[in-house]
Amino acid sequence: MPYTTLTAADRAAELSRSFGDFWDPANPLGSAALLAADEQGVLSTDGEALLDRFGLAAEYVPAELGGRLTHLDGLVRVMREVFRRDVGLGLGHGITSFMAAVNVWTAGSPEQQRHLADLLLDGGRASVAYHELAHGNDFLRNEFAARPAAGGYLLEGVKQVINNADRAGAWVLFARTGDGPGSRSHSVLLAVPDDMPADRVQRLARYRTAGVRGCRLTGLAFHGCPLPASALVGAEGRGGEVALRSFQVTRSALPGMAIGTVDTCLRSVLRFALDRRLYRRRVFELPHTAGVLTAAFADLLLCDSLSLAATRTVQLHPEQASVTAAAVKYLVPRLLSRTVRDLSVVLGARFYLREGEHAVFGKHLRDLPVLSLGHAGPTACLATLIPQLRRLATAPQLESLEALFTPADATAPPPGIPFDRLALSATGDPLTAALTPEGAPASVRPLLTDLAIDLSAVRDRARTLPPADRTPLASPEAFALAARYAELLGAAAATGVARSARSGFLSDPAWLGAALHRTACRLGLRTGSVPDRWARPLRHELLSRHEQPRTFDLYNSAL
């Protein structure tokens, strides 16, 4: 595989160079060409060819199996370059393979891991089938069954809305292997389509979707299809545990990839605001527009901070990742979706156009909800947090490590992702200790004081939650408490990133003040737009990165 000796930062830069100028209408990998493919309901042929040459699938395979996966934040950084340009290409060409493979990296046998690694490194794909439309996120009620039979199992039932099922070389199937209620009646299976009798498997018709139109979402119907016992991933009846541990990895990673999508949305609106004149001024100079763009930049940086902290927690504190994974999968898609909606107001009627320079904004707006839902919507993520709130409130706060807020390329590399140490519930979280006014710049100290007090109040409330409010069937008040906790984790992550920065823009308290002010407003602790003492430096940085051009995320990378 090429590029295996490069850091994730260098691989991301190489991929960005290979894609070329996104805004060049003559670029076969630019926005115009990608939009044309989306209109036709297909993935860009040139885009898929580029990702094949780059060997993108190697990003999903652990280094010990011959791939490039050593740091989860490194995977996010590379994939962000794809999602920056086309969500459909990011999902359709491959991240679905990663979502499937994590189950095998987490609980599969050495033989299963070797088989799947070889498939991916050879350019193949894998699909994952967790859910059924009748049951949504309540996948423990699934009806798709793998019944015991001589030498293995017989598959019976239907799985819907599976990405790449019709062109995958492996299927990871979540199936009922027992009749009782609960997780111990489900298992994970690794199936090889080419080894299955064609008359026992039916590939269903493709689904038409509002977003990611190029993705091939289909279904599978099995009719007494035999599967060998060697297909079982992990122990029988442990499918729920395998899935929940795998979710901690994918929930931590996917929101950070979506930041590339919103980066492009912000850039598209900024280009419009700088070129368009209204009331004898550039639209960018209008107070409302300036406020929207400043808020979008601040929220994007906070989202990236939580994304970085969540992926680094998987790496450095895997036993606590169930908390940060649920928080980032709840909060980041929610904030990014709100950011894009706010930006659409600035773009005005152009936001509806499906051709022209700004049509990419509408495409990203249609595509983004797919990433927001993925394999778990926001309610499911809060339902993961709720049973842990009381334990988080009563356990001592864990010490925050600077490495949680620093990209892996800048630190000593750990020995791969510790899939075997992921736990179903956490004993604490390593982020909230960063949410303290001690040692903070004077300008942000009042905000941090108020947020720290709010965190203390949330912990006090969590200690008194009745037993009924410690389950996924909890009251709306318990869900609101979990959502507030996730907001505070986002603020803590941004504070940790700012404290860890030694120089440059991230060490300037302006962006942190703006991000914390936005959080405080969402929590009802502040009102109004970002104060000018923070907004001015953010607008200056936004313009500087646009002109160079560089990304709007934490990495400030060249485009």
Image (cartoon, rainbow, N blue to C red):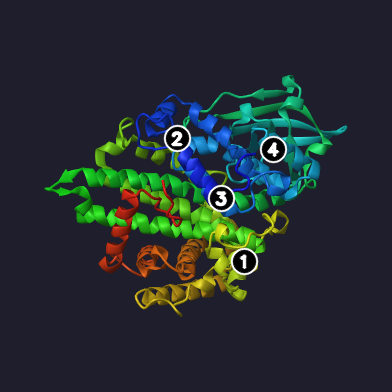
Q: Which of marks 1 and 2 is nearer the N terminus?
A: 2
487 left or right of 530? right
Q: Which amino acid does label 3 sit on?
A: Ala
Mark 1 and mark 4: Cα distance apart in space: 33 Å
For image coordinates 70% across by 24% down, the residue present is: 201
Answer left or right for 86 relative to 531: right
- SS label for mark 2: loop
Residue 1 image point, x, y percent: 65, 39
Gap in angstroms between the C-alphas marked 1 and 2? 40 Å
Q: Mark 2 points at which residue?
A: 211
Decide which of tag 3 and tag 1 comes sooner along the chain.
3
> As shown in the figure, which amino acid type bears the numbered disc 1?
Pro
Front tag of 3 and 2 = 3
| Mark 1 crowdedness (10 Å alpha carbons): few <14, some 14-19, many ≥20 | few
> In which image quadrant can residue 156 be found?
top right
Closer to the chain start, of discs 4 and 3, is 3
Which residue has dot 1 on it? 467
Instruction: Point out residue 134 in the picture as x, y percentages from the top left corner.
Output: 59, 37
- Characterize the local packing of mark 2: few (<14), some (14-19) or many (20 or more) Cα atoms within 10 angstroms: many
Q: Distance between the residues labelled 4 and 3?
A: 31 Å
Q: Mark 3 points at which residue?
A: 8
Lower sequence index among marks 3 and 2: 3
Between marks 1 and 4 in the image, the one whose residue lies nearer the viewer: 4
- 60 lies above or below 47: below
- For label 3, the crowd category at 10 Å Cα-Cα, with few meaning under 14, some 14 to 19 and many 20 or more, is many
Q: Which mark is residue 490?
A: none
* Picture quadrant of residue 30: top left
Q: Which of marks 4 and 3 is in front?
A: 3
Distance between mark 2 and mark 4 Cα atoms = 25 Å
- Amino acid marked by disc 4: Leu
Q: Mark 4 points at which residue?
A: 173
